[in-house]
Amino acid sequence: MSETASAPVRVRMAPSPTGPLHIGTARTSLYNYLFARHVGGTYVLRIEDTDTERSTVEHERDIIDNLHWLGISWDEGPQVAGGDDVGPHAPYRQSQRMDRYAREADRLLADGHAYHCWCTPDELEAVRRQQAENKEAPRYDGRCLRLTDADRAQFEAEGRQAAVRLKVPPETIRFDDLVRGEVEFDNALLGDFVIVRANGVPLYHFVVVVDDEEMGITHVIRGEDHLSNTPKHIALIRALGYREPRFGHIPLILNPDRSKMSKRKSQTAITAYREQGYLPEAMVNFLAFLGWSPGTEEEIFALDELAERFELASVHKGGAVFDQDRLDYLNGVYIRNLADEQLALRLRPFLPEALDDASVLRVVPLIKERLVRLGDAAELVAFLVETDAEVGSRYDADALLPKNRDAAETAAAVAAARDALEGLTEADFSADVLESRCREAAEVLSWKAGDFFRPLRLAVTGRPVSPPLFGSMELLGRDRVLARLDAALGKLTAAGVPTA
RNA sequence: GCCCCCAUCGUCUAGAGGCCUAGGACGCCACCCUUUCAAGGUGGAGAUCACCGGUUCGAAUCCGGUUGGGGGCGCCA
């Protein structure tokens, strides 16, 4: 594919701040970014906030922050929510570009490419219902085009506000899609669609075309859900006398049932993943491979490596199911690849304040390969911040017993461990020493090491599953370990009495 | 209903006429390692390349049809 056209490439992402950054929007943004970087083009961020009812600054902030979080940067557009625009085509928020849309709408009206429509929502609904009954395509019947001057005067006298509709010529629209190849539509089937609401606010299909022209966008890369909208845009482009950009429609990200990924069936907000402790590097790597592959068997790539290899021509046509298991796996890979110091830094926001930075750094080697998400760390290190009483309340005497061992035997084992450790000074209280002492104690009693460690783990961490036992003991310190063993012993003797 | 798009293991994918008795990864199963859980190692199950017809000496790869799935048909974006 000749992506290296002579004209400088300009692409854009155009999120709508009607919700937090969506997985699909993030992936589309990523593909635009990768394409722009790959060909040395310019990347523009434009905020599509014409839906004043649903657009909020909070959502704009969420979108911009999370795009930055993913490592995606842009050359033009707002860099900060509510902040100043940067670039020669400012402003980049559609709510601030209304004069341009009004000007272009007037031009369309004057040229006869558009006309006023006084139909009310109820009237339109009635037409649609009628068409549904007749099994016809639901489209505007053009009734306002046939209005007389008297009719118009009548509506205006009634104080009715008119919307503006584009007069769509009945012609075949063809375009060469960057990922799908030749696509053909019959615009006779389209119907005249509204470009400006009765309240004067322009609609998406119209503003997107006006802005793409004014901002010099050369390649429109967007989700497949816009494929059927493209003929509308081309009709608009022709009516306005604009030059036509290249279009590329990337496949949708799907729910497990293969429908378009939605909030109802999947977790779609990037923020939610961020809060659970997914790494942006993993998310980017994962998203990039949803609908594209470099054609090799390598699968771990950083953002700049992706930009180096990315080809729009090798993007798939079929949708891709969002596979959480695969994301989890990738996240684990990225976590394990982090240096301990780096991981400690990233873990900080997910861990209790009570755990000081030095302890975080020390616990990292113990939990690193056990983490799927950064957020999982809290549970793994909880035993360090919980009080001895809290740890003790997490289990009962029965849970301490290995298979085929009763309370008395187990109490003897725990007591033996306790005795073996008691003699150690705080300075000698290191994982290696602790392990060899405990193994010796187990051997003396002829216990299997695994059985012997089980009650110790539960006593020390309050959990049957924990980071490595002796490293955990070392971090906890001599006194707290002994206290927790004593607590366990107490439970065992209390439980042992009635049965003994 | 109409229009458009799509179709390789459960999932993400490699594959651009012979290299494919279809490769990798995730997930799953088994074993090894092992103080739990992980991580790691080894092996395994898993796809008649949706189906049917062509084209060709030869098709997962090209063409047509069928079926299935998805998307779009708003004074939402």
Image (tube, rainbow, N blue to C red):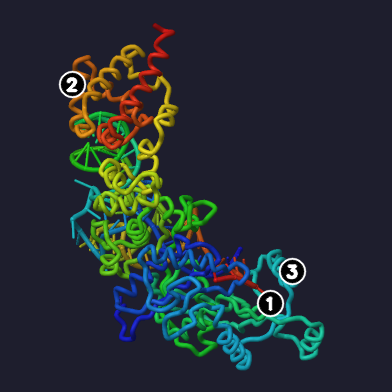
Name the quadrant of the N terminus of chain A: bottom left
Alpha carbons under labels 2 and 3: distance apart: 87 Å
Instruction: Choose top left, top right, bottom left or bottom right for residue A491.
Output: top left
- Name the spot of residue B22 as percent of width and height, x first: 25, 50
Residue A255 horizontal/vertical position (percent): 47, 53
**Label 2 chain ID:** A
Give how far apart the Cα atoms at labels 2 and 1 are: 90 Å
In percent of the image, x 22 and y 32: which residue is there? Answer: A429
Q: What element carries label 3?
A: helix
Residue A395, compared with residue A323, is above or below; it is: above
User: Helix or strand or loop: what does disc 1 sit on?
Assistant: loop
Amino acid carrying label 3: it is Ala
Residue denoted by label 1: A141
Give the residue number, with chain letter if any, for mark 3.
A126
**Residue labelled with disc 2:** A440
- Residue A97: where, in percent of width, then height? 55, 83
Q: What residue type is labelled 1?
A: Asp
- Sequence-earlier tag: 2 or 3: 3
Task: Compare residues B18 and A94 and report the one nearer the observer.
Answer: A94
Q: In this view, does A4 lie above or below A295?
A: below
